[in-house]
Structures are given as C-alpha cells and as structure tokens.
Amino acid sequence: MPFGICRSPAGGDLHVCSAIGEFVIDLAVLDEVGAFDDTPVAGTEVFHEPTLNAFMALGREAWSATRQTLSQLLRDDCDELRDNTELCGRALLPAHEMELQLPVDVGDYTDFYSSREHATNVGTLFRGADNALLPNWLHLPVGYHGRSSSIVVSGAPVRRPQGQTRPDDKQPPVFGTSNMVDFELEMGFFVGPGNVLGEPVPIGEAEEHIFGMVLVNDWSAR
C-alpha cells in the first residue's frame, strides 16, 4: 500500500495518507480513533506530520505493521470501518478532491549512474567507443549528489534550466533559458532509518532501510 501526504483543497492540515482504488485514506483520522494502538506508531503522532520523514525513521517494523492494520481494516469481513459511516466519511476521501504534496523533506539525494547503455553512450561522446566505460565502472556503483531543492511533486510545472550558451562562436556567451531539455525516467528510492556517519549499510540489510520507490523524471539542460 502506498503512502503520501495530502489535504483537502478547501484547506486544513497536511496528513499522512494511503490509497485504495479511487479513495485516499487519512491515517491521522484512523490514528485518532486508536486504529494503530497495537503497532509501533502508537503515541508517536507521525501521521499528523506534514511529511513522511518521521514515519520513515521508525523503520520497517512500523511500516509493515501499518500496512497490515490497513489491510485488516479494509477487508470485506471487517466491520470496524465498513459499518462506521461517520468514520468512513472522515477517513476515506475521494482521491480526485485531494491535493497531493511532496511527501518527504528531501535533505539530500544520490543520483546513480547505473545504466550500462547510458554510460556507454555518454562515454563514447566524451572519450570514443574504445574507451567508453572507465575501468572501475563495472566494479562499483557510480553515484553523485543531485540538487535536492529541485525535486517537486508530480504535476508541478517543468521549469527550464538557465545558464550560459554560445550560439555564435565569434560572440561572447549569453545567459538565458535552455532551448531544449533531456529527461531520464528513473527509479527513486526513499531511505528510512539512516546509518552512522562512516558506517556503510551492509547489502544484506539494505531492505530494512528502503522505505519505498517512486518514478522520477530527471530533467537536464541540453
């Protein structure tokens, strides 16, 4: 089950939500009636936060328990939510009426250069076909920092980058908006619990840290 941040277009506080079919599930409302009292999120009020960061930091046990609780509440044979018209009206909201927000406060992100075909094409442009891939490319994950402030929620306007170009080699460069942009459709992974500075997360424990995945449009100036 997915997690996100939303609120009604009419206003109100941002809450953690999930979704099923054409409905958004307000987890803060369910938390207020004690739906998560037997889970690790009890008493934390993480579902009342305007981002998923606090919930993500609780770890896989809390994420799994939340999903299990929601799955139970939404079963046909569970009357706790099904027969409570008042609670359904507050907790299950039409998705088309909700305003989705950027779900996390992204403090930093690493962009991995992990497509062999893409790396080969770019390397060929810069170094020629015979030296397209650097010797260490096949032996370690190449990653670099991206600009986290440019991450926006789906549906936000695309803003073309600005910078210097030199359309005329005989004239000085000019500053302006990029005439063309490229994009890469990438997988973006959210990391929940972090690691101690200088202590990498072992590969065998990676799943305990990965909260979820989204599709990312990576735009860049040409």
Image (cartoon, helix red, strand yellow):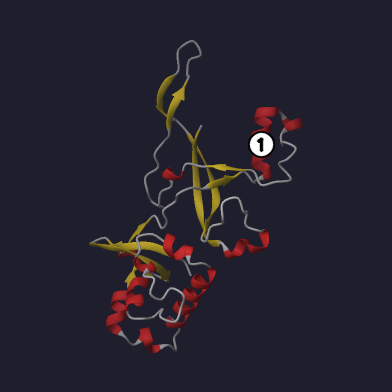
Q: Amino acid at mark 1?
A: Asn
Q: Is residue 149 above or below residue 201?
A: above
Counting from the top left corner in percent of width and height, residue 195 is at 56, 57
Q: Position of residue 160 (x, y in %)?
A: 41, 36
| Looking at the image, residue 192 lies above or below residue 129 | below
Residue drawn at the location 44% of the way across and 86% of the way down: 76
In the rendered structure, the answer to whether residue 132 lies left or right of residue 68 reads right
In the rendered view, would you say 115 is above or below 10?
above
Q: Nearer the viewer, residue 56 or 11?
A: 56
Q: Residue at x 36, y 56 (%)?
A: 101
Q: Residue at x 37, y 85 (%)?
A: 82
Q: Which residue is mark 1?
A: 121
x and y, in percent, of residue 137 in the image: 71, 41
Depth check: give the residue in front, 37 or 73: 37
Q: Is residue 24 left or right of residue 217?
A: left
Q: Give whichever of 212, 65 is nearer the camera.
A: 65
